[in-house]
Amino acid sequence: MNERYLNRITLGNCIDHIPHLKDESIDLFLSDIPYGISLDNWDVLHNNTNSALLGK
């Protein structure tokens, strides 16, 4: 494994960074999709018991 990834938080394009990681070497992988890519229904508030907690 490339030592520059050891005990580091890395910000960047995962497609560029993942090939440099050793198999089974990741404890946490946090990813966030780009803002504004218009995925359908990602923010729909469904009518369920949690809706009352949100005041909706």
Image (cartoon, helix red, strand yellow):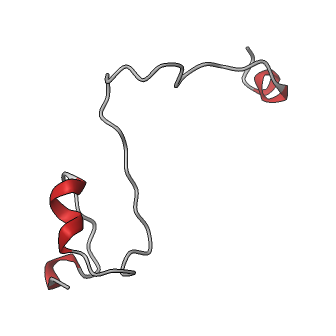
Residue 28 horizontal side relative to residue 22, left or right: right
Q: Residue at x 14, y 78 (%)?
A: 4
* Residue 36, position as x, y percentages in the image: 32, 22
In the picture shown, does residue 31 fall above or below 40? below
In the rendered view of the protein, which quadrant contains the C terminus? top right
In the rendered view of the protein, which quadrant contains the N terminus? bottom left
Q: Residue at x 78, y 27 (%)?
A: 53
- Residue extending farthest to the right is 49
Judging depth in this view, the residue of 20 and 29 nearest the camera is 20
Residue 12 horizontal side relative to residue 45, left or right: left
In the picture shown, does residue 28 fall above or below 11? below
Q: So how many labels did they put on this image?
A: 0
* Residue 19, position as x, y percentages in the image: 19, 68
Judging depth in this view, the residue of 39 and 32 nearest the camera is 39
* Residue 37, position as x, y percentages in the image: 32, 24
* Residue 30, position as x, y percentages in the image: 40, 56
Q: Which image quadrant for residue 21? A: bottom left
Judging depth in this view, the residue of 32 and 9 nearest the camera is 32
- Residue extending farthest to the top is 56
Q: Residue at x 60, y 19 (%)?
A: 44
In the picture shown, does residue 47 fall above or below 24? above
Q: Which image quadrant for residue 18? A: bottom left
Q: Which image quadrant for residue 33? A: top left
Q: Residue at x 54, y 22 (%)?
A: 43
